[in-house]
Image (cartoon, rainbow, N blue to C red):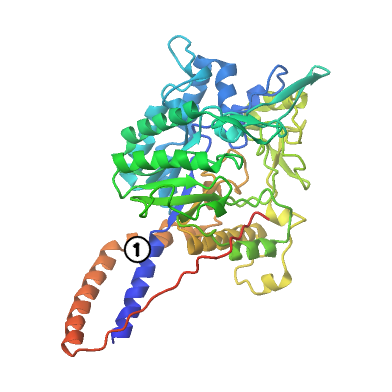
Amino acid sequence: MINLLILLFFLFFLFSAECKKIKGTNLGSLFVLEPYINPSLFYQFLGINDRVVGDTYNFCDYLGPKEANRQLRLHWENWVNEEKLNKLKKLGINTIRIPIGDWMFSPYYTYNKEEDGIKCFDGSIEYLDRIMNHLSVIGVNAIIDLHGVKDSQNGYDNSGLAKNIITQKKDNILHFSHWNSRKADWIGDYNLTTKSYNNINYDNIYFTLNIIEIILDRYKDFKSFWGLEPINEPWEHTPLNVLKFFYKKVYDMFVEKVSKNKVLVFHDSFRPQNWTSFRFLEKTSIPKVKIYLDTHQYMAWGIPIRFNKYLEGAEKWKQPYTVFNIIVGEFSLATDNCIMWLNGFMDNYPGFPNQKCYYDDCPYKDIYFNQILNGLRGPFGEGESYPNQNGQCPNSIPFYLNKNISLDENLIKNSSNYNQNDKEKFYATTLFQQLTKSYEKNSDGWIFWNFDTESSSYQWSYIKINDKGYLKIYEEEKLNIFYKHKSLMISFFIFFLILILCLGYFYFFYNKEKQDGYRIIEPNQNYGSISV
């Protein structure tokens, strides 16, 4: 009887723990613009030959504060609204990661310019307040993610500034390069020759810490505020000792200001193996608040392989050994680099795309056709990723059309849900299930990138995956069984607890021999990646 009760309690514990897994998505390209997510905002910059406008900073600088703010307010209102947040909740999302820029709270450089009393990001904080309030109402946790910081932490457009673009004109058409000159100067003056920093910019570090203090003071008491990620994707050249110094300062501030049921999220700086000790935070004890290590897992930058190999890689994925809890803060279903401008406006990473891309109508082609055609006149980066003369844009290749991805016949035979008439559904559902199964098994959960895109492809859009009916099993009634039947589960637990107490009395009364169990967790688990 005792063994049966222990088994029941263990099953209840596992069920409750499963319901608490992070199942989230990102609100990407809301406050930190990304051209591949919202290309319609950047069509207007096609064909110009005096500069490259492919990020948030240059968007504000080129348009000027007044016009940029007008366009941004329309974007904020339409890109993320209460209806979409409600839909994400209904689809089983329990956590929303909100990428923001430091310029929202303390404008600098072009963000601080005024035109008729208007700055580029005026109104952005109030809109963030609105999102946080609504998430509080519908009961969804929010992680505020400082995605872009002063002078860029990685040199990509996703930091707000594609840093150090070099341009030249050929036949009055602008050409540019970025990859070999990319710099990230947030933490100091980066030397492209030595691949190291000439100095550390503590003014920038303390500027960011001041922004974080403003954020915590404003949002710490919101019901929806669950966590803070103080910087996103600081690149792999960031000195780890300085990054840990920064994280320590954030940690001390967080402990002082925020209740202990909130969490901190530290990005691994693309070096997940280097976070094996708490000592940079606490010398003699564990941290005073829960800390997650954020790792980003993408397949899009790998070589094309058979579909079975993607499934095997997903199944074998293991978190790196670390003293911190792991979350997969970004991942998608894309296995190629084809979606237009993924690697930058009118650019691509050297060597990509490494396969023939799929083309379909550019987003909002009927509205912006003339602007789209201007892309035939540049500006042109080092890699190919631009619209054609028919107003079509490169897009993620549907799995069933990708000649580099094929199914093993045994996998088809052994799959009960394979449908010859809807192969794409099989590919998408099977891959998503295997990825999230591994992430939930070997980490504390996942946050899909992104909640949506303007592109017709579902591979970067959690909403489109569901709109196509590919993830019916992940709708709320099956994702959140515990919460849907909360009263029943609480009643069961109370009954079970009373039963345990009664049997415990009986057990000790008859002086039964006590038995203890334990579980060993090996500290040297190998880290696997699905970034093949």
x and y percent of residue 173 in the render?
78, 20
Q: Left or right of 484: which side holds 401?
A: right
Q: In the rendered image, which quarter contains the N terminus?
A: bottom left
Is residue 29 toward the left or the right of residue 198 in the image? Answer: left
Q: How many marks?
A: 1
Residue 264 visible within the image: yes
Rendered location of residue 475, percent (x, y): 45, 57
Determine whether, in the image, residue 225 is placed left or right of residue 399.
left
The residue at the far top in this view is 116
Which residue lies at the image location 78% right of the left edge and 46% below the top edge?
A: 356
| Type of amino acid at the residue the image marks with label 1 | Phe
Instruction: Quickly name the residue at label 1.
Output: 482
Determine whether 252 is above or below 41 in the image. Answer: below
* Residue sticking out furthest to the right: 171
Q: Using residue 179 as the reference point, say whether residue 523 is left or right of it.
A: left
Residue occupying the point 44% across, 51% down: 292
Graded by Cα atoms within 10 Å as few (under 14), some (14 to 19) or many (20 or more), the crowding at tag 1 reads some
119 w.r.t. 40: above or below: above
Image quarter where the C terminus lies is: bottom right
* Quarter holding residue 97: top left
Q: Do we see residue 38 in this rendering?
A: no
**Percent of width and height locating residue 284:** 36, 54
User: Which residue is most to the front?
Assistant: 283
